[in-house]
Amino acid sequence: ISGPTPAAVGPLARLSLLDLSHNHLEGGLPDLSRMKNLQSLLVHHNYLNGTLDTVSSLVSLNHIDVRFNEFSGDLQLPLLSLGLLRKVFLSGNSPNATMTPLGPAVHAEGQVSAGGAMISQDKAALRDLWQQTNGPGWFIRSGWEDGDSDPCLSYWYGVFCDDKGRLTFLDLTRNNVTGVLPRSLRQLAMAKSIRLSQNRLRGTIPRELGGLEHLRTLRLDANMLDGPIPEGVGRLRELEDLDLSDNYLSGDVPEVREPGGLIRLTTLRLATNRLSGTVPESLSEMRALRVLDVRDNRMEGVLPEGMWRVPGLKEIRLGANRLEGTLPASWGRLERLLTLDLSGNRLSGQVPQDWGERFAKLRFLDLSGNALSGPIPPTLFSARRLEHVSLARNRLSGRIPETITNVAGTLTVLALGSNRLTGPVPSGVARLPMLSELDVGDNRFFGFLPAFISEVPSLVRMGHTLSLGGNDFACPIPDTPSASTATCTTRNCALGWVSDGKRCFQCRPGFHRDARGTRCSRCTTSIIEEDHPKYGVVTDRSCAVFRGDLPGLGSAGQGEADAFSVKCLPCRIAQLEGLRVLPEEDAEDLKVGRGYQVVRGRGSLRYNGSSVYADGTVYTGEWADGAPH
């Protein structure tokens, strides 16, 4: 975006965030006096000029970033009355700009020094960082290359100081910082924030970082660091944000090492490392914790019961580990939880019955890839804000609860594939208008595919995100895109008919259904090749395989069938003669005592006691003498 900042943003009185960064805006800021609710003003990396006087009216402002523009005048004077300010970034503007000290009323972590030169120990630590991380190879090196300049009195990229010449904020994110972290970083005793994410750092995290008592933010994620997390991290009382994810770290998750340690920690991100051991119970002592992310590690043991004592938890991500045991029922008390991801572990047992009753704000639930069993508790869908539910690849049984309609206004993803769920697909699925992904494949659902699969617009639009295959739906399957993944099996076809996955079709005379039920195979021997002289026209020509002799069926040129051979005969005649009918397999695979047989006195072909017809029709016939059979 180029040109002046649009004046139309000024009247947006309810706006809380204005981000116009990384553009080509010119001129001064428009009148912002009406924006009493604005909390974040981000206009860095533009060509703006003039003063920041209009900012003084932003009484709700918490975060201002105007770096790398051409602002002049006293940049900090308009901020003196803004008591809610916590983040202030003003560097990289006109060299003629001045800085009135903000004073103790503003506790900002990034403010530029108003005067004092950096003390020697802080500068020495920065020079060590430059030398040990290939400083000349950094993407942005402004100020660092001039070793004689002062990081607090002149501009050093990513360095921010307080008015006493101490480094308070170091941010070299995505700057090609390569090499190892120097132990001398311990000298940055007043540092509140160190951000070195998304670089190419290697080696171990210096244990000396555990001694930075004022540190609030430590972000070293997306590097190549290895070794353990320093024990001293567990003693930091001021630390609020710790992100060490996407490295090669090993050892244990940090624990509270002394009373008051990590008492202010709100975010703990350690995902995608090689951490092992158990999830420490001491996490329940971190009462300020809001985000716990230890996904994709090698964690073992059981889930800590005491996590319910951290009432403000909003996000728990422990997926892709080796956790065992059952789901703690006590976690149902986490009333502020938004995200719960326990996928890809070895958890067993049932989903607690009272989960969901207190999950008033839960939006994302992923328990897939475990060994959970039992039914899906109907109370689970009492969490009326659920948007994503994945219970796939478990051993769940029973039916989909009808209470699923409780989340009709929010649910977008429902993944229940690869379980042991049964029954028909409930009609309540049709009343989920927000649904964009449905997976019920590889279960034991039966019956005719509900008509709404092809009629409900939201399901029709899904396309490839609708998975219905691997169930026992009755044939035929509707020929519509939304039902394209559904299949029906031969078990839903009449005897002598096979399924091609979408419909049933009848085998030709002299053929029988093979063991897999996927095709018609030619009978090894067929003793009847035309209409039978005794029974007349044989309308049912589908073939049944049997073992035994055929009394009374001998005819000139054919003779009696071998009592020990496997033969093929139209199903109707086999039934009328009371012959044992075996599974429609290739002849050499047949075994006596298995499969279909005629039940004398009832005249129905049955398999393991159940009618072979999908609709329960009984196959009946008569003896030659006309007596009912």
Image (cartoon, rainbow, N blue to C red):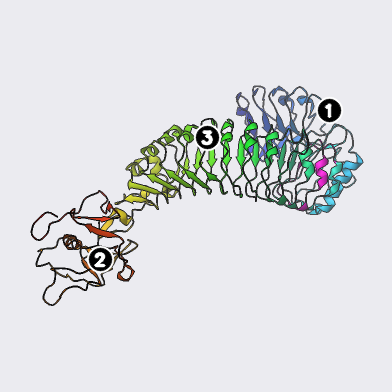
Residue bearing mark 3: 355
Task: Name the secondary structure under disc 2.
Answer: strand
Q: Nearer the viewer, residue 348 or 416?
A: 348
Residue bearing mark 2: 545
Span of residues in magenta: 188-213
Q: Amino acid at mark 3?
A: Trp
Residue bearing mark 1: 101
Image quarter hosting the N terminus: top right
Asked if the magenta segment contains residue 82, the reply would be no
Q: Amino acid at mark 1?
A: Pro
Q: Residue at x 76, y 22 (%)?
A: 81
Q: Earlier in the sequence, mark 1 or mark 2?
A: 1
Task: Name the secondary structure under disc 1.
Answer: loop
Nearer mark to the viewer, of 1 and 3:
3
* Neighbour tally class for label 1: few under 14, some 14-19, many 20 plus, Cα within 10 Å: some
Q: Is residue 567 above or below residue 324?
A: below
Q: Nearer the viewer, residue 596 or 467?
A: 596
